[in-house]
Amino acid sequence: MRTAEAYVESLRARKLRLFVDGELCDSPVDHPKVRPAVNAVAATYALAHDPAHRALATSHSGLIGRPVNRFTALFREREDLLRKLEFQRVLGRLTGTCFQRCVGLDGLNALWVATHGRPEARSRFDAWLRGVQERDEMLNGAMTDAKGDRSKRPPEQPDHYVRVVERRADGVVIRGAKIHQTGAANAHQILVMPGQALREGEEDFAIACAMPVDAPGVTMVLGRQPSDDRRGGPDAGNARFGGQECVVLFDDVFVPNDLVFLDGDLEACSTLVNTFAGYHRASYGGCKPGNLDVLIGAADLVTRENGVRKASHVRDKLVQMAHLTETIHGLGVGASAKGTLHPSGVWVVDPILANVCKHHVTSLPYEIVRLAEDLAGGAMATLPSIADLDHPELGDALRTVAGTEERAKALRLVESLTYGAGSVPFRIECMHGAGSPQAQRVVLERTIDWDAKVKRARVLAGIDTDHELGDELDA
Ligand code: SF4
Ligand code: FE
């Protein structure tokens, strides 16, 4: 397994074509807007070598017969689903941001399920996965298409979707783009997957394949995030870590046959999309509570600095923040604990609890953020820079009225996490990552057994006979 240092070095070996603010970036790893996100991924590598966390961070691979980083492992036991959640919570707490490796993890497990019963696809995927595990690679799980006008199907607006534009004897050529690509510029490989279930006649869009991030024709463009110019500086808030999303453009990228896992298989692609959605919606019950732990800690820290920590309304707000955080975590744990064994040999989460988990993530963190802003007070939005507090002429006077540098850093952290450079994982990603709120409602409506509920209601209302409990109770 790679160390954090070896991971960072391995990124330098890539010939990645990455644009940042309109300019080609020669050395992504050293760019101040990229490096915090590299650090967050590096933490996933570091913990695999940390005796305190190794049990969570690694998993035994039956494929290559040795321990691998959990982010490349199949969910071979129900406990693997639970360990993933715990590992995500630890990483979320240690980094205070998105550590970017879960889309790849959830994607590779979903592909294992989707290739079940398809020997050719499975053998190509199996061979590829062994290589990923052996090299301990970071994957950019590339799902979300641009989608354009949502009232139109992919063939009506092909440029808004990744699709196969040519099939050759030795492989396929793909074109299009994936957007919102978490950690793409920090990855070794791209795992392209369809972003939605597809219909007959849409086979060209039903493509799941892999490629190196620097394959000819791949271009990445770094997404901007609030206050990202502060990254790496004293006012960053979160001093070391940050998230990352990119647009990934595929300009006629050739993918050899051994890296094509599904091509035109509508049924397998639908299984892939649904299975992935379940895994990733449960994942938010791991990382988000970890992130929220940091926000609770930051808000608590400010109340201590302000001398109000013991006030009953302050204590109550902190309890409420923790209560909402544990609600999300409990749902992720529940979705994992109620997982079932798929015939392919990997465990899948309970779809109802996974969707309820993610659905709560679309609202509860906003309330937690509101409470953090309430506790932090107005200074989180009006404080001068750390440079001003350190200024030889102004410093003394400013620190008297604005507080110590320690207080300023605590306020900057709350600012960063609630609406600054670090806020994407606390807000927008909570809303739209792993599917916008309506996507979860659609799954819930489709998955819940409404008739079973009505059936029991009819019995208890005395309309129908109670076959389930029989007459013995009345004897
Ligand atoms: Fe992982 Fe959470 Fe980031 Fe998704 S949002 S990649 S689950 S840390
Ligand atoms: Fe995400």
Image (cartoon, grey):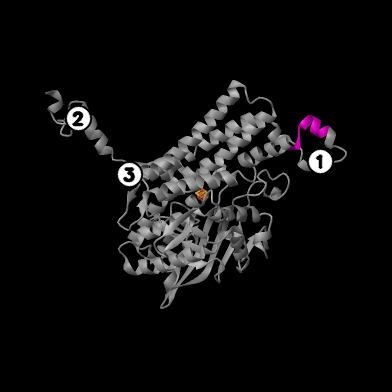
Comparing 359 with 1, the one in front is: 1
Of the residues shown, which amino acid type is indicated by label 1?
A: Asp
- Identify residue for label 3: 447
Which is the main secondary structure of the residues drawn in magenta?
Answer: helix
Of the residues shown, which amino acid type is indicated by label 3?
A: Thr
- Identify residue for label 1: 390
| Mark 3: secondary structure | helix
- Assess whether residue 202 is covered by the magenta stretch: no
Percent x, y of residue 107: 44, 57
Give whichever of discs 3 and 1 has the lower sequence position: 1
Q: Please give the label number shown on residue 459.
A: 2
Residue 201: quarter of image: bottom left
Percent x, y of residue 21: 67, 57
Whether residue 11 sits left or right of residue 131 in the image: it is right
| Mark 1: secondary structure | loop
- Against 343, residue 412 (above or below) is above
Give whichever of discs 1 and 2 has the lower sequence position: 1
Residue 461: quarter of image: top left
> Hey, which residue is sitting farthest front in the picture?
51
Comparing 230 with 309, the one in front is: 309
Of the residues shown, which amino acid type is indicated by label 2?
A: Val
Residue segment shown in magenta? 397-405
Q: Is residue 353 visible?
A: yes
Write the residue at 51% across / 40% down.
289
